[in-house]
Amino acid sequence: MSSPETGHAKNIANFESLINFCAGYGPTYNPGRASLSLDALRTKLEASKAAFADTINKEILYDNAVNARLDAFKDFKGLSTKISNALAASGVGPNIIDAARTLNRKMQGGRATPKPEATVDAVETRTISASQQGFDTRLEHLQGLIQLVSSQPEYTPNEEELKPESLKALIASLYAINNRVREAEVVWSNARLARTKTMYAEGDGLAHIALDVKKYVKSVFGASSLEYSQIKGITFRKQS
């Protein structure tokens, strides 16, 4: 688990400890503010646990979509080269061949040393690339190449994967796979937003309520009391 997620989990665990200490104070813990009551604190705890778990689940779904896209695109460059070569062997004119080679060159990217696939995975999982190696751009280039070869009567390969019908079906499936990543990212982002509101909203977020609970205990038992000393070191740090 990443460090930020560990921070959220720690805040939840600390909040649960705070509730347990307050419950141990018996009837003396009797705040006038409803949101600081034990029942309200337990409700906030369960809501925070649920929001945290939902975020983790949505992140897993996003990562699964990313990995599925990487698998679907792993032979992307090789296929582009096969298409270009098959077109060149079909007897079309040099201008058409040059156009196909230009699209294929864009597909291959301009890096002197290609990134390892694992590195692409790590970067792509958390960022949107601005380079031509971005998935949207590569799809655009491949679609252009498929449209080019499909428009040439001379392009009649016997290989099933290179036939225009197969290529059109492939590009449609790749667009769908790419869109699923975008959709999963939105769902994950919304889950993170919901977690942030539940745990860190001003006034009624878990972290703010926890600080107010500590203030209440301090006011009831005193700053030098054993009761306050039990909870004053319990920390709550806002996470993004």
Image (tube, rainbow, N blue to C red):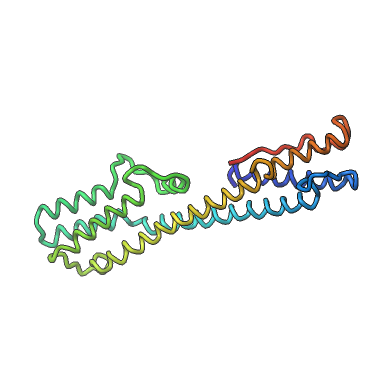
**In the image, 78: left or right of 178?**
left
Q: Give x and y (percent) for residue 141.
A: 27, 53
- Residue at horizontal 39%, vertical 44%? 129
Image quadrant occupied by the C terminus: top right
Residue farthest toward the right in the current orientation of the protein: 27
Q: Give x and y (percent) for residue 212.
A: 75, 39
Quarter-wise, where is residue 164 in the image? bottom left
Report the number of numbered marks.
0
Q: In this view, does 148 lie above or below 8?
A: below
Q: Which of 30 and 61 is in front in this view?
A: 30
- Residue at horizontal 76%, vertical 47%? 35
Residue farthest toward the top in the current orientation of the protein: 224
Q: Give x and y (percent) for residue 163.
A: 23, 67
Q: Give x and y (percent) for residue 161.
A: 27, 66
Q: Is residue 142 above or below residue 155?
A: above
Q: Can residue 161 be seen in this view?
A: yes
- Residue at horizontal 14%, vertical 63%? 152
**In the image, 194: left or right of 231?**
left
Q: Which of 235 and 109 is in front in this view?
A: 235
Q: Is residue 136 above or below residue 158?
A: above
Q: Can residue 11 be seen in this view?
A: no
- Residue at horizontal 62%, vertical 47%? 197
Q: Which of 14 and 123 is in front in this view?
A: 14
